[in-house]
Every structure is written in structure tokens, then in C-alpha cells.
Image (spheres, rainbow, N blue to C red):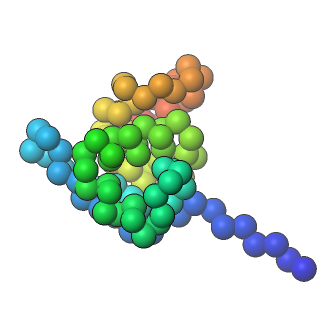
Amino acid sequence: MRRRYRFAASMGSVTCTLPDGGSVTLPIVPGILKHPTPESLASILVDPNVARKYTMEALRHASWPVLSLFPRQWLKDCLRDARVPARRHEALLFLLD
């Protein structure tokens, strides 16, 4: 019997309007936030606070193939506030530059 592994992938994208008037388009990747179902994720990511938390969780735990789906400048902005271990922080800065 052959095992099949399903890796994290984007199920689409959603655009979130930010408080400063700008907007950011985020990929919908189930599993970054633990509790929302994949179907409800799109509806809650339109809130800027949820979008920021979602991105910071992705910075803490997601692999680079998932992070590369996010806008780079948005990742850099969120990296400042994310509590990421020092080694991962250095690696992320390297990958984002």
C-alpha cells in the first residue's frame, strides 16, 4: 500500500483592506490558524487584525514554500512584531532580502 502525503497548499487568496487605506492579498492556507475551518478562513481574513495574526503565525511556523506565497513587504512588516526565535528571524531576513 502506498502512502500519499498532502503538503500545505493555497486554496485561493483573499484581499484585506488595511487601516491605512492600503490593501494586501493573502493566500488561504489551512492549518496556519488552528481553529478556523478552511471554508471559514476566507471570511475572517478580511479583518486586518486577523490578517496580521495569521501572517505572524505563518512566520513562526510555516515553511518557505508557504511563506513565498505572501507579499514580501507584508512579511517584512509583520516580522517586526512577530515573536520569532532568533535563528529563524535571521533566516527569514535572509530569505526576504
Residue drawn at x 48%, y 44% as measured from the top left? 58
Residue drawn at x 25%, y 50% as measured from the top left? 47
Residue 27 image offset from top left, x and y in percent = 39, 58
- Left or right: 18 as drawn, with respect to 44: left
Residue 13 image offset from top left, x and y in percent = 34, 64
Q: Nearer the viewer, residue 48 or 21?
A: 48
Q: In this orientation, does residue 61 appear? A: yes
In this picture, is 55 found above or below 69?
A: above
Residue 59 image offset from top left, x and y in percent = 48, 38
Q: Nearer the viewer, residue 27 or 91?
A: 27
Report the residue that reaches farthest toward the front: 35
In this picture, is 31 found above or below 12?
A: above
Name the quarter where the C terminus is drawn: top left
Report the residue that reaches farthest toward the bottom: 1
- Left or right: 37 as drawn, with respect to 42: right
Residue drawn at x 85%, y 77% as measured from the top left? 2
Residue drawn at x 32%, y 57% as measured from the top left? 44
Report the residue that reaches farthest toward the top: 86
Name the quarter where the N terminus is drawn: bottom right
In this picture, is 66 found above or below 75?
A: below
Within the image, what quadrant is residue 73 found in?
Answer: top left
Report the residue that reaches farthest toward the left: 21
Q: In this orientation, does residue 29 appear? A: no
- Left or right: 25 as drawn, with respect to 17: right
Q: Nearer the viewer, residue 95 or 21?
A: 21
